């Protein structure tokens, strides 16, 4: 399983106790050579961010269809987790944060080449 440790961090970010405490994990990712830095959060918190209201509308429709078919949203096995969710995130290009303000980003876990705990900071 590619990026197994990263998937463990995503499972932890989505744990109900972590979500309840609104805990985040500062992380920096290399995604196909592009640096992305932000705070790892749960899927549910990601879609409650104001910036993601349009996405949430569509996710809610998809989730409702799943609940209608299966009675509940099934837990995704760790090896099948596809995405991680970041807030207060930015891309880093030639040492410059883009955008200059913070944003939220969804990252495909299988696209992550490397990662470290901690966020990049402007000097």
Image: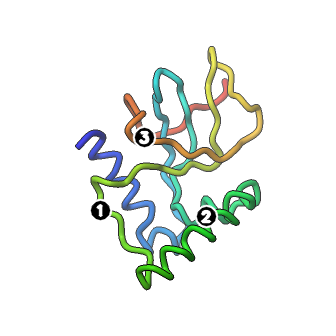
Mark 3 or mark 2, whichever is nearer to me: 2
Badge 1 marks a residue whose secondary structure is loop
Residue assigned mark 2: 59
Q: Secondary structure at mark 2?
A: helix
**Mark in the foreground, 1 or 3:** 1
Using the numbered discs, state the Cα–Cα distance from disc 1 to disc 3 in whole angstroms. 24 Å
Q: For the residue labelled by badge 3, is the local secondary structure a helix, a strand or a loop?
A: strand
Pointers 1 and 2 in contact (C-beta within 8 Å): no
Q: Position of residue 85 (x, y in %)?
A: 53, 51
Upstream in the sequence, badge 3 or badge 2?
2
Image quadrant where residue 70 sits: bottom left
**Extreme residue toward the left, this view:** 1
Q: Is residue 6 above or below residue 37?
A: below
Q: Which residue is mark 3?
A: 117
Classify 10 Å Cα crowding around label 3: few (below 14), some (14-19), many (20 and above).
some
Kindly identify which residue carries mark 1: 77
Instruction: Identify the image quadrant of residue 36.
Output: top right
Task: Verify CB contact (< 8 Å) between mark 3 and mark 2.
Answer: no
Q: Is residue 2 left or right of residue 76?
A: left
Residue at the spot x=51%, y=61% of the render?
Answer: 42
**Callout 1–callout 3 Cβ contact below 8 Å:** no
Mark identifier at residue 44: none
Horizontal side, residue 1 vs residue 6: left or right: left
Can you say which quadrant of the picture contains the N terminus? top left
Q: Position of residue 110 (x, y in %)?
A: 38, 38
Of residues 113 and 119, the one nearer the viewer is: 113
At a point 46% along the width and 28% down the height, the residue shown is: 30
| Image: 41 above or below 109 | below
Q: Where in the figure is residue 12, as x and y percent of width and height? A: 38, 61
Mark 2 surroundings within 10 Å by alpha-carbon count, few (fewer than 14), some (14 through 19), many (20 or more):
few
């Amino acid at each position: 399983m590619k990026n197994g440790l990263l998937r463990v961090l995503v499972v932890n970010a989505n744990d109900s106790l972590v979500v309840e405490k609104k805990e985040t994990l500062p992380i920096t990712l290399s995604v196909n050579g592009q640096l992305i830095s932000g705070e790892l959060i749960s899927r549910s918190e990601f879609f409650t961010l104001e910036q993601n209201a349009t996405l949430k509308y569509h996710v809610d429709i998809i989730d409702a269809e799943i609940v209608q078919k299966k009675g509940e949203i099934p837990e995704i096995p760790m090896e099948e987790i596809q995405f991680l969710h970041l807030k207060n995130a930015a891309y880093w290009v030639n040492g410059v944060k883009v955008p200059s303000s913070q944003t939220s980003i969804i990252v495909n876990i299988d696209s992550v080449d490397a990662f470290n705990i901690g966020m990049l900071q402007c000097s």
